[in-house]
Image (spheres, grey):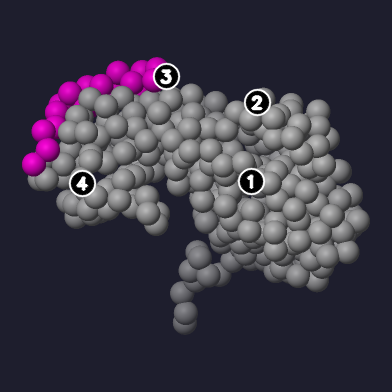
Amino acid sequence: MTATHPFLDLPPLSAGRFADIEDRVARLLGTRQDVVITQGEALLPLEGAIRATATPATTALNVITGPYGQTFGDWLRDCGATVHDLAVPFHTAVTAEQIAEALAEHPEIDFVSLVHAEAATGNTNPVAAIGEVVRAHGALFYLDAVASVGAEPVLPDAWGVDLCVIGAQKAMGGPAGVSAVSVSERAWARMAANPRAPRRSYLSLLDWKERWIDGGRTALLHAPAQLEMLALEACVERIEAEGLDAVMARHRAAAAGTRAGARALGGGLEPYVHEARDAAPVATTLRAPAGVPASGLVARALAADPSLPLAAGGGALAKEMIRVNHYGTAATPGVVRACLAGLGVAMAEQGLSVDVVGALGAAERGMGGEG
């Protein structure tokens, strides 16, 4: 007789439970907008939302503060949209004033795409202030909040965000295979008016609107990804139990401690994002010492302790950027200390002068407040 297995022998996930999980995600975002849980990694709703709303008649302002902003511009152009890219150095953040200037220069802009926090580059953008500018202009506001949700406030309604995409795999501490998007009435109307919006497609948000939401959320479009849905439910429950404010405080403290500790470690290591106000609480990026490849330092540290949430930057950034991914359950003092110690040992092996004890002390002090 075959034994039952908790991951395999699962009862069907009902439409009611699916809807309840959507409602809990909506409460996490403080939104009254429709929330659609999508059955895939966050690239699914990120691409689906652009392809549903962008047309050859669209003029978009696409803000680039990291690699995902570059991807969004590619999708927008693929939809035939006219795209004005606003790129800022990865060591900083875009400002509401820069957004306002771009909108004034191109008053025909009717779509703004922005990444809230770029885990890949370690910066975060002031969405509340930017939202005021975009709302005053009247453009549709598309936001990638995949990395930021759980690490810092994400408030689609208060900020005037029309399409807010989140994923569970970073600060929420959940699975990578499920995501969600909140959709405003304006965004639904833009999709409905777009003859090129995907339909009868895995990318289609309109399918969910017409067959799921408009039908009273009683019949699912397809069999849900049970394991991922149950894991999403569990991570939302864990956030609710700890308290969202407490979860965000853990992430802020981890970021502050990592930045302070990196400065005190010495050896030429320093925060990649110059100002603390521009630094994402979900992950801290560090600039490797001159002449020392970041990828080599990360490899040495991971060889000693493979559990460290360290990574080198992607592409050309692998030469200069180290990323400390202190998100989810890794947003703790213990993880921060372990990462600093691991980097200190790797740097010492390269002949660099480091002060690990001083770095750990600075990190402890940094985690006691903002910095």
**For the residue marked with disc 2, what is the amino acid?**
Glu
Q: Mark 3 and mark 4: span between their CA atoms?
A: 29 Å
> Which mark is first along the chain, 4 or 1?
1
Q: Nearer the viewer, residue 69 or 116?
A: 69
Q: What is the number of the mark on residue 97?
A: 2
Give the number of the mark in front: 3 or 2.
2
Q: Measure the C-alpha gap from mark 1 to mark 4.
A: 32 Å
In the rendered structure, which amino acid carries the disc numbered 3?
A: Glu
| Residue 316 picture location, percent across and down | 37, 54
Cα distance, mark 3 to mark 1? 32 Å
Of badges 3 and 1, nearer the viewer stands 1
Q: Quadrant of residue 273?
A: top left
Q: Secondary structure at mark 2?
A: helix
Q: Which residue is mark 4?
A: 292
Type of amino acid at the residue the image marks with label 1: Asp
Q: Residues within 10 Å of mark 3 (few under 14, many from 20)?
A: some
Label 1 residue SS: strand
Q: Which residue is mark 1?
A: 85
Q: Is residue 198 left or right of residue 329?
A: right
- Please name the residue shown 74% across and 35% down the image: 105
Task: Find the distance from the CA under tag 1 to the CA under tag 2.
Answer: 15 Å
